[in-house]
Image (cartoon, rainbow, N blue to C red):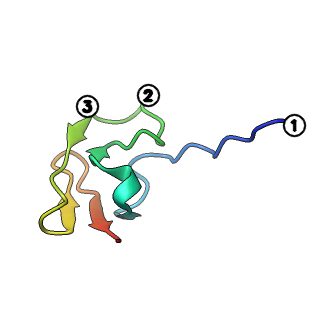
Amino acid sequence: MVATAKPLIEPNTQNQYQVGPEDLPLCCPMPQMYLWNSHPRVYLPIEDEGWAKCPYCSAEYTLVK
């Protein structure tokens, strides 16, 4: 049996992403994204407000519980 990996997400192609508790601590770009053409990784505080915006690419993240 061969395990299949989920395809990587292209960074900076969407303005809004929904993330869950499994994605915490939240960083942009996320580990599931290609990194070669993106900005430096920055950690975003999303736990208190349920929403965060990346200062580099302006991607908006909403925490879905």
Of pointers 2 and 1, the one earlier in the residue sequence:
1
Residue 43 point in image, percent of width and height: 20, 42
**Which amino acid lies under the numbered mark 2 shown in the image of this protein?**
Trp
**Which amino acid lies under the numbered mark 3 shown in the image of this protein?**
Pro
Give the residue at x 15% y 49%: 55
Q: Which label sits in the foreground, 3 or 1?
A: 1
Please tell me how many numbered marks the rendered image carries: 3
Q: What is the C-alpha distance between the residues marked 3 and 1?
A: 36 Å
Q: Secondary structure at mark 2?
A: loop
**The N terminus, quarter of image:** top right
Residue 6 point in image, percent of width and height: 64, 46
**Which amino acid lies under the numbered mark 1 shown in the image of this protein?**
Met
Image check: 48 left or right of 38?
left
Above or below for 20 versus 40: below
Q: What is the C-alpha distance between the residues marked 2 and 1?
A: 31 Å
For residue 36, the mark is 2
Image check: 54 left or right of 24?
left
The image quarter in which residue 13 lies: bottom left
For residue 13, the mark is none
Q: Secondary structure at mark 3?
A: loop
**Mark 3 near mark 1, Cβ–Cβ under 8 Å?**
no
Q: Which label sits in the foreground, 2 or 1?
A: 1
Q: Secondary structure at mark 1?
A: loop
Residue 11 point in image, percent of width and height: 42, 46
Disc 1 marks which residue? 1
Give the residue at x 52% y 48%: 9
Give the residue at x 34% y 42%: 29
Q: What is the C-alpha distance between the residues marked 2 and 3?
A: 10 Å
Q: Badge 3 local density, few (<14 within 10 Å), some, or many (20+)?
A: few
Nearest the viewer among 24 and 56 is 24
Disc 3 marks which residue? 40
